[in-house]
């Protein structure tokens, strides 16, 4: 097992949740993958090894703020990807 397999970015889950919450019938898998990449590039990484540790050490206000930032990043990313399609 490589070290890379033992570490995750908490924002990946939050961005995925925000994408799921804003999903539209016309969204393709390629479009959503691009949205996720753009959104994640606009957010700071928050790495962790064990999800329970991340949730234990995050305060409610901090988690709420991270969710709000994720949703805003996804909305901005949707517009960006839509405006820059090939």
Image (cartoon, rainbow, N blue to C red):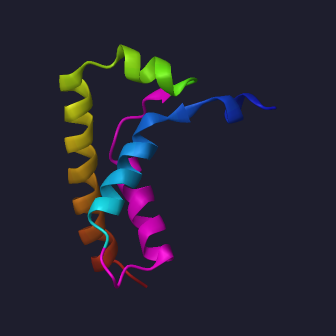
Magenta stretch holds residue 69: no
Residue 84's x, y, as percent?
34, 77
Image quadrant containing the C terminus: bottom left
- The residues colored magenta run 24-47
In-front residue for pair 19/44: 19
Instruction: Measuring from the top left, give residue 11's x and y in whole percent.
Output: 40, 40
Q: Is residue 30 above or below residue 10?
A: below
- Residue in view at x 20 percent, y 52 percent: 72
The residue most toward the top is 57
Considering only vertical position in the picture, is 55 above or below 11? above
Could you tell whether 17 is left or right of 2 in the image? left
Q: Is residue 28 left or right of residue 8?
A: left
Question: At 38% from the left edge and 79% from the top edge, which residue is drawn?
Answer: 27
In the current view of this chain or complex, which residue is farthest to the right? 1
Frontmost residue, 67 versus 46: 67
> Where is the N terminus found, in terms of image quarters?
top right
Expressed as whole percent of the image width and height from the top left, the position of residue 17 reads: 36, 52
Residue 15 against residue 53 in the figure, above or below: below
Image quadrant assignment for residue 75 = bottom left
Magenta residue check for 30: yes
For the point 49% across and 74% down, the residue is 29
Residue in the picture at 44% in, 35% down:
10
Q: Is residue 86 above or below residue 76?
A: below
């Amino acid at each position: 097992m490589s070290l890379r397999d033992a570490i995750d970015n908490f924002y990946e889950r939050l961005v995925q949740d925000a994408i799921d919450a804003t999903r539209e019938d016309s969204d393709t898998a390629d479009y959503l993958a691009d949205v996720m990449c753009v959104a994640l590039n606009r957010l700071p990484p928050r790495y962790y090894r064990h999800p329970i540790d991340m949730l234990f050490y995050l305060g409610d206000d901090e988690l709420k703020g991270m969710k709000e930032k994720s949703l805003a990043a996804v909305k901005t990313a949707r517009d960006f990807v839509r405006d820059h399609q090939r």
